[in-house]
Amino acid sequence: MNKQETNAIFGISSFWVMAILIAILVCGFAVRLFDLTDPPLDYAATRQLRAALIARGMYYKNNQTAPDWQREMAIAH
């Protein structure tokens, strides 16, 4: 009995590989659209606010045109 060589991964034809890949991408897109209209701080607000404070401090630390009091306040917090 001769085995035919196929261009398949794990014996699955390329059609099914593409179909599964497209299905995974469509499901991921559908999950991303869930609660898209919620406000941005609806989830993990503390983490997002902390990241914003860090970014603000970095901005004012490197901004030489900002007043000294504003730079010190941003870096301190």
Image (spheres, rainbow, N blue to C red):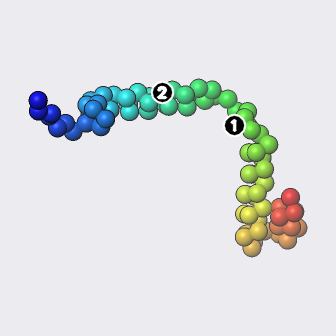
Q: Residue furthest bottom?
A: 64
**In this rendering, does residue 18 appear at all?**
no
The residue under label 1 is which amino acid type?
Pro
Residue 73 on image: x %, y %: 87, 62
Q: Quadrant of residue 3?
A: top left
Question: Toward the viewer: 20 or 73?
Answer: 20
Left or right placement of residue 41 versus residue 76 in this view: left
Q: Label 1's element? A: loop
Q: Is residue 34 above or below residue 58?
A: above
Q: Is residue 58 left or right of residue 5?
A: right
Quadrant occupied by the C terminus: bottom right
Q: Which mark is residue 27?
A: 2
Report helix, strand or loop for mark 2: helix
Rendered view: 18 above or below 49: above
Q: Residues within 10 Å of mark 1 (few under 14, many from 20)?
A: few
Q: Quadrant of the N terminus?
A: top left
Percent coordinates x, y for residue 4 in the rendering:
14, 34
Q: Are marks 1 and 2 in contact (CB under 8 Å)?
A: no
Q: Position of residue 56 (x, y in %)?
A: 76, 58
Residue 64 figure quarter? bottom right
